[in-house]
Amino acid sequence: MTVRFGLLGAGRIGKVHAKAVSGDANARLVAVADAFPEAANAIASAYGCEVRTIEAIEAASDIDAVVICTPTDTHADLIERFARAGKAIFCEKPVDLSVERVKACIKVVDETKGKLMVGFNRRFDPHFMAVRHAIDDGRIGDVEMVTITSRDPGAPPVDYIKRSGGIFRDMTIHDFDMARFLLGEEPVAVTATAAVLVDKAIGEAGDYDSVSVILQTKSGKQAIISNSRRATYGYDQRIEVHGSKGMVSAENQRAVSIEVANGEGYTRPPLHDFFMTRYTEAYANEIASFIAAIEKGAKISPSGADGLAALVLADAAVQSVKEGKLIKIG
């Protein structure tokens, strides 16, 4: 079976998913839609697909699934439309910035028996997957503490910050999902602190650029998250999981993994400096997982419920910072 795709949105992340779909032997990119014709034409030319309107893709009989890469405020409406149209849906995170809107959207997906996957790509990074496998294999015993470090090389433009929903909903949300993925239990309490240390314009826009979060589960497991919009040494992505019998960790990745030793000491090449290069394999793997789930009629993960759970944690972190206290999750 070849899963036939329509791509909604031909921007930066749309290009990543166009490559992933086109590179999968079990998929074919049939059409692309974008508000900017030149962007859609560029993908159509690169991958041999057609440029169509969203309405045409929605009604198309030669399209089985869609990848939604449009602006965040369009996600929920498009998910509902394509669920009703009977298409399988892959949507970049988040489904929406409002918990209530996400709940309403998931309800439509459930009522239509739709298939929805939310793009938490880091679950599919080979290194982070290996951490999860080590846990599943019992190599470190029972998980007790998770430490996640996620720091960007530089802050995005302030215009982006203003419409992003804030650092907890835009950046930390990936780490909330990863914490849930590794803890094996749902967090029931959130404590967060935040500051503006990188760019005062971010603070003037109502956001933060440096945050720390502690998540706690009912049994007492903890996840500690460290985020910064600035890491002068590259894209800092590390995970450590401590268990009753040991520890497993995933280190930073480099474009070239070598080490040079000479009279000046030991040196290694710099880290990746962009999420698209750091997570190239993860993007391909998540699309492959989506395709396999469609072909087999299997449960899709991460699901809309996973997207909702991460957003609930993000909202709790925002509340914790504002009120200066631990926030319990209902």
Image: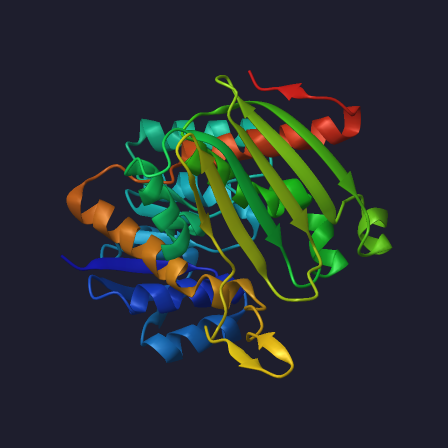
Establish if 87 lies above or below 13. above
Q: x and y percent of residue 126 in the render? A: 36, 56
Q: Residue furthest bottom?
A: 263
Closest to the observer: 308 or 193? 193
Closest to the observer: 288 or 294? 288
Asked if residue 8 shows in the view, the reply is yes
Give the quarter of the image for residue 305. Answer: top left
Q: Residue furthest front?
A: 263
Q: Number of marks in the image? A: 0
**Residue drawn at (23%, 54%) of the image:** 61
Closest to the observer: 224 or 141? 141
Left or right relative to 117: residue 157: right
Q: x and y percent of residue 252 in the render? A: 52, 60
**Residue drawn at (55%, 15%) of the image:** 330
**Residue drawn at (63%, 26%) of the image:** 190
Left or right relative to 114: residue 70: right
Q: x and y percent of residue 265 in the render? A: 62, 77
Asked if residue 165 shows in the view, the reply is no
Closest to the observer: 270 or 278? 270
Establish if 63 lies above or below 166. below
Establish if 200 lies above or below 102. below
Q: Quadrant of the N terminus?
A: bottom left
